[in-house]
Amino acid sequence: MSKEIMITTADNPYDPFTQWEQWLVFDNLKGYHTPERLAKVAPLSEQLSDTEFYESVEAGIEAMMRYGALDKAGNTVEFKKVIKEAK
């Protein structure tokens, strides 16, 4: 059994695994643009193995969690890691 990881903000009520569209709308309305930020700090390539891909995403999530997100009002909002066990 492996696991999948995602990042979300503490204020987002939606599950990014099962409610992706609602999660993304909330994220964008707040001005976080989390997927785009993750793409900047976790460079990915088709050349990466599954393990390297996972490690790059996890390192990017950890980096983002150190700083948090800013909402449109300039308030810092905490990022958190969401883990799902994959079968």
Image (cartoon, rainbow, N blue to C red):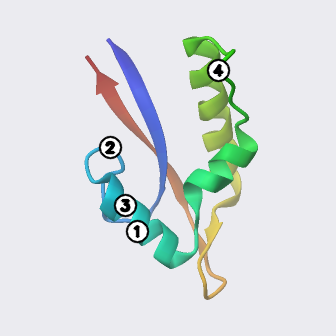
Direction from residue 66 to residue 18 in the image, left or right: left
Which three-letter amino acid code belongs to the residue tagged 1?
A: Val
Asked whether residue 58 appears in the rendered view, the answer is: yes
What's the distance in space between the residues labelled 2 and 3, CA to CA?
Answer: 9 Å
Q: Nearer the viewer, residue 77 or 4?
A: 4
In the rendered view, would you say 14 is above or below 51?
A: below
Label 2 environment density (alpha carbons within 10 Å; few <14, some 14–19, many ≥20): some
Name the residue carrying label 3.
23
- Indicate which disc residue 46 carries: 4
Nearer the observer, disc 4 or disc 3?
Answer: 4
Q: CA distance from mark 1 to mark 4?
A: 27 Å
Which amino acid type is shown beneath numbered disc 3?
A: Trp
User: Which is more N-terminal, label 4 or label 2?
Assistant: 2
Q: Secondary structure at mark 4?
A: loop
For discs 1 and 4, the disc positioned in front in the rendered view: 4
Q: Residue at x 61, y 22 (%)?
A: 53
Q: Would you place residue 59 above or below residue 63 in this image? A: above
* Disc 1 and disc 3 in contact, CB within 8 angstroms: yes
